[in-house]
Image: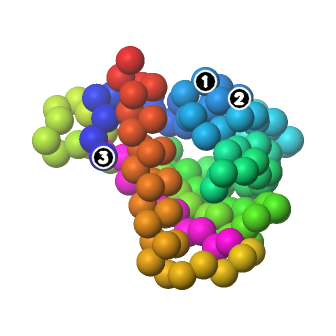
Amino acid sequence: MDIAASPERIMERLVDFERYPSWALDIKGVTVDSRDARGRGQEVSYRAAAMGRSTKYTLRYTYHDDPCRISWELVSGDIMRRLDGSYLLEPAVDLPGGTQVTYHLAVELLIPIPGFVKRRAEIKIIHTALRELRAHIES
């Protein structure tokens, strides 16, 4: 998805974990449990709405040499065994001065669900996350 903002501005918002509940509608609470040497959130715990119930999970973030890439992996979660992903920010081709945001996500729940239901849920999560991010940054 293209967003009318610089990669630096977008990354600044992506790592401001404590503010997620103000713009990411399914996120109900965030706690930064540990920070790296530069003060960036390293292990972050979330409380979120998921599938009609509340869920808790903790992610470990990795900051790469490329300042336009951040990734994470699940440390613990009450309804999932995998919630790994990344954001990649690149110049937008069709939006001068904008950024193309690519969001990768891999989810594996503790309870098995049919593949087509899982794919639909992953698509919904990704599109909702990107739309909410764009609305937050462009507002």
Q: How many marks?
A: 3
Who is closer to the viewer here, 95 or 36? 95
Instruction: Name, please, the residue furthest toward the left.
Output: 94
Q: Which residue is mark 3?
A: 1
Question: Picture coordinates of residue 33 (x, y %)?
Answer: 86, 41
Taking the view exactly as shown, the residue that stands out farthest to the top is: 139
Residue 18 - label: 2
Label 2 and label 3: CA atoms lie apart by 23 Å
User: Which label was assigned to residue 22?
Assistant: 1
Q: Residue at x 76, y 43 (%)?
A: 47
Q: Which amino acid lies under the numbered mark 2 shown in the image of this protein?
A: Glu
State the residue at coordinates (75%, 34%): 29
Q: Is 32 inside the magenta-drawn segment?
A: no
Secondary structure at badge 2 equals helix
Give the magenta-colored segment's residue range.
100-109
**Amino acid type shown at disc 3:** Met
Instruction: Kindly identify the residue that appears in the image at 65 percent across and 38 percent down.
Output: 27
